[in-house]
Amino acid sequence: MAKKNRRGKTNKNRTQSADGEVIRVRLPQEGEVLGQVIQLLGGGLLLTKCVDGKVRQVRIPGKYRKRMWTRTGDVIICMPEYGLHPESKGELVHRFRKNETKILFQRGLIPEEFLEY
């Protein structure tokens, strides 16, 4: 259930966990796709299975390379590269933690096979 702020409005991106902690979940914006890391290719590249049914080679940008560590099975937000190869290449935007992944599944944004890893 979303928590109401002082004006009485609810924030759609907030969810309360079992211990009462408020969790904010970043949702994909226009042009972004949810995906799951299949394989680490090395050199800042990931092989990702996206929700739209395509398998993309995702690049980790330089500002995230040392800060955002990814493993096989992590759920990420990917921005497809518009230009020559939008179906096969993309760029990492955000990585979800395990508790955020469960919230995305409860909202129906990711399929059940993304939770198996």
Image (cartoon, rainbow, N blue to C red):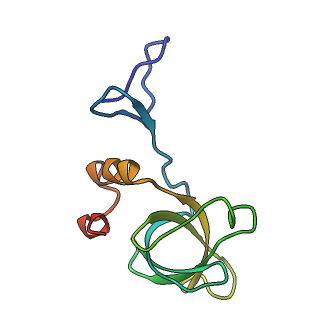
| Residue displayed at 33% across by 47% down | 103
**Front residue (pair 27, 42):** 42
Image-based side of 73 in relation to 117, left or right? right
Q: Image quarter for residue 72?
A: bottom left
| Residue displayed at 69% across by 82% down | 83
| Residue displayed at 41% across by 30% down | 22
**Location of residue 40 with respect to 105 vertically, above or below:** below
**Location of residue 81 with respect to 12 vertically, above or below:** below
Q: Residue 21: image x %, image y %?
A: 39, 29
Q: Image quarter for residue 52?
A: bottom left
Q: Residue 77: image x %, image y %?
A: 52, 62
Quarter of the image that includes the N terminus = top left
Image-based side of 86 in relation to 10, left or right? right
Q: Image quarter for residue 109?
A: bottom left
Q: Residue 67: image x %, image y %?
A: 66, 59
Quarter of the image that includes the C terminus = bottom left
Image-based side of 44 in relation to 57, left or right? right
**Front residue (pair 70, 33):** 70
Tally the numbered discs. 0
Q: Residue 27: image x %, image y %?
A: 48, 50
